[in-house]
Image (tube, rainbow, N blue to C red):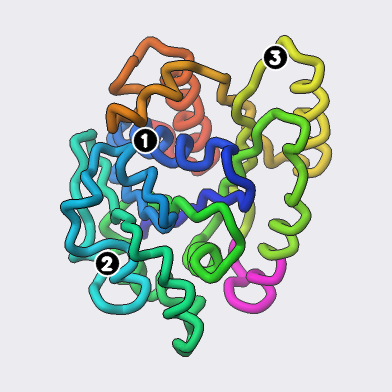
Amino acid sequence: MGKTIAIVNQKGGVGKTTSAVNLTAALGSKGYKILLVDIDPQGNSTSGLGINKRGLKISSYNVLIGDSPAESAIVETPYANVFVLPSSMDLAGAELELVDIQKRESKLKNALALIKDDFDFIFLDCPPSLGLITLNGLCAADTLIVPIQCEFFALEGLSQLIATVRNVKRLYNPYIEIEGVLLTMYNGQLNLTQQVVEEVKRCFPKKVYSTVIPRNVRLSEAPSYGQPVMYYDKSSKGAHAYSDLADEFLRLNGKEK
């Protein structure tokens, strides 16, 4: 059975979608069958994997509100072993539609249960909020990855995220755990970066990945071409970092090849 990992931080601009796109591409290139479920209404993971959102008839919106099975929405990407369940702007209204539905927090979990065996790993790119859509992601996930940028306000709001995860564990999903904390936008020459790293390690003992994601121009450019960075510029620091992260992720999951 595949493992489902939510990539979550209610703070925007922390490298959440960048990590979702590039980690999935790196794992796919290593021979693992990956599904990226885009449940962020902005749909940046969808376009970051080269999928034209305007041409979609079925999206994660239809899956969440129960209109369509997950299998019917999955699209094969141009990248090795990577599939996407795409997002569309319709998803922005899903929270209102879910409010009156019974067991609304389990809609995504139930939909993905039917396809979980088809993939080695399923990643969920959650919106930068702690609303009903993110709640669906946390209820569907076995674990979560928390990207944190190495900047002054990095830890702001994290206590709220941890409190939400605790509530989800208590009320809906007793098995969810933190998979790992990923440091992004890393610049080792700055004292502030080192201070943030020390603080994050203090808050999340033994959960911080040893791989860090540097600030990298190629990482910023790649999405505008609809490509993961390893396909856009394989020699870039960003591509090497996500390849290393994929290796570390696999090692921690006992999947070394």
Question: Could you say whether the residue bearing mark 2 is in a helix, strand or loop?
Answer: helix
Q: How crowded is mark 3: few (under 14 residues within 10 Å), some or many (20 or more)?
A: few
The answer to whether the residues at label 2 and label 3 have Cβ atoms under 8 Å apart is no
The quadrant of the image that shows the N terminus is bottom left
* Mark 2 vs 3, N-terminal side: 2
Residue closest to the eye, 89 or 217: 89
Q: Residue 5 vs residue 164: left or right? A: left
Q: How far apart are marks 1 and 3 (CA)?
A: 26 Å
Residue at coordinates 27% horizontally, 42% vertically from top-left?
Answer: 82
The answer to whether the residues at label 2 and label 1 have Cβ atoms under 8 Å apart is no
Q: How crowded is mark 2: few (under 14 residues within 10 Å), some or many (20 or more)?
A: many
Residue 39: mark in rendering: none
Residue 123 x %, y %: 42, 50
Query: Which quarter of the figure has residue 92?
Result: bottom left
Residue closest to the eye, 143 or 1: 143
Residue 70: mark in rendering: 2
* Mark 1 vs 3, N-terminal side: 1
Residue 12 x %, y %: 59, 44
What kind of residue is marked 3? Gly
* Mark 2 vs 1, N-terminal side: 1
Total numbered labels? 3
What kind of residue is marked 1? Leu
Q: In this view, does 24 lie above or below 125?
A: above
Residue 139 x %, y %: 53, 69
Residue 27: mark in rendering: 1
Q: Name the residue under label 3.
A: 188
What kind of residue is marked 2? Ala
Q: Residue 181 vs residue 236: left or right? A: right
Q: Report the span colored magenta.
A: 166-176
The answer to whether the residues at label 1 and label 3 have Cβ atoms under 8 Å apart is no
Is 86 part of what is drawn in magenta? no
Q: Can residue 145 be seen in this view?
A: yes
